[in-house]
Amino acid sequence: MQANSPVYAVIGDPVAHSLSPAMHNRALAACGLPGVYVGFRVTDLPVAVAGIRALGIRGVSVTIPHKVAVMPLLDEIDDTARRIGAVNTISNESGVLKGTNTDGLGALKALETVTAVDGRRVAILGAGGAARAVAWALSNAGAKVALFNRTVPRAAALARQMNLEWGRMDNLARWRAEILVNTTPVGMAPDAGAAPVAAAILDPAMVVMDIVYNPLETTLLAAARRLGCTTVDGVQMLVFQGAAQFERWTGVAAPVTVMRQAVIEALSPTLTHRHGQAAVF
Ligand code: NAP
């Protein structure tokens, strides 16, 4: 490490359990790049953004609760972040702070490791911030997206805004999804026995992705795997959104395999194993 080595950071509140430092530091090391990635718990966001400028922090991940509030504090917001309505990535390009959002791209790249999405029917469970990012990226890539949410008017409102379809949960089976993505927290530890939909609505030809990553194999993904579906876990989205940040900041291809390994190692002390079984890595 040199005095002028680049510094990268995640800002959020809380931030102590963020997996991003483990993932990005491993990626920097694997690529032989100088630099360090640290976590800052931020309660005063305008002062923190002034700090990014003053200290020349090269790249910043933005997490809850600052993803929306940071937008007016930056110099430029790209079209992706504007359409998603949130920034998760800041690049400091010679003092100009540029905001984008890599969450949707992370979900798209995670799915594309197992399937094409163009022209496919995708049902998204949920209508919150993550649903918005995932829906935007998948529909932009040519998927036919429909939103299904516990609070139906919220799905309808988001669908209208984003020019998507929406439906009631009890119509999900009739919508004949080829790809199902859970963007709700249902199934996350400590409530790992829960699933956002009944296994009966799954079909062996479906690709099922869960963005919950603790447990790594959620109850939904376990049911899908038993039925013969192709599955994608939540760590994949986390890694690919981080990979997009890494590439933007460094200009170097992200080492996604080592990044996934770093995340799983960082998660493992807290990883919930459903029904006492070992999680499948
Ligand atoms: P959010 O904005 O609060 O939205 C939560 C959504 O889940 C809402 O649509 C909500 O429905 C629904 N929901 C919550 N509890 C529910 C329940 N018990 N039953 C049915 N639906 C329920 O949250 P978010 O920011 O979108 O995050 C959602 C999840 O995604 C979190 O678990 C987060 O950790 C995870 N995530 C993962 C990644 C990754 O990289 N893997 C990235 C981002 C987020 P209502 O509208 O009815 O309240």
Image (tube, rainbow, N blue to C red):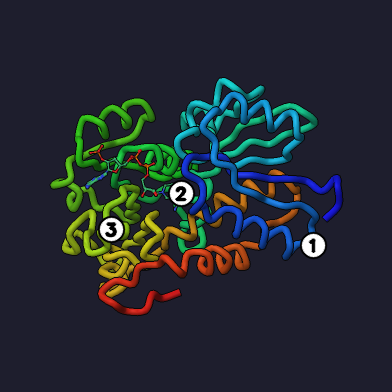
**Amino acid found under the numbered disc labelled 2:** Asp
Q: Name the residue carrying label 1.
A: 32
Q: Earlier in the sequence, mark 2 or mark 1?
A: 1
**Mark nearer the viewer, 3 or 2:** 3
**Label ID, residue 76:** none
Q: Secondary structure at mark 1?
A: loop
Amino acid at dot 3: Gly
Residue drawn at the location 72% of the way across and 58% of the way down: 28
Q: How far is mark 2 from mark 1, CA to CA?
A: 36 Å
Q: Quadrant of residue 232?
A: bottom left
Is the residue under label 1 in contact with that under label 3 (CB below 8 Å)?
no
Q: How many residues crowd around disc 2 within 10 Å: few (fewer than 14), some, or many (20 or more)?
A: few
Residue appearing at x 44%, y 44% in the figure: 138
- Where does residue 159 sit, x and y in percent of width and height? 32, 32
Q: Quadrant of ligand 1?
A: top left
Q: Amino acid at mark 1?
A: Gly
Image position of 281 (left or right of 5)? left
For the residues marked 3 and 2, what is the alpha-carbon distance in whole angstroms? 28 Å
* Percent position of residue 109, x then y: 53, 54
Foreground residue among 47 and 273: 47
Does the Cβ of the disc 3 residue fall within 8 Å of ligand 1?
no
Tag 3–tag 2 contact (CB < 8 Å): no
Where does the image place residue 20, in percent across and percent down from the top left? Answer: 57, 53
Q: Which mark is residue 187?
A: 3
**Dot label at residue 118:** 2
* Image x and y of residue 19, in percent: 53, 56
Query: Dot 1: few (<14), some (14–19), or many (≥20) neighbours within 10 Å?
Result: few
Q: Nearer the viewer, residue 32 or 201?
A: 32
In this view, 28 is above or below 84: below
**Side of 51 where 195 appears, left or right:** left
- The front one of 131 and 147 is 131
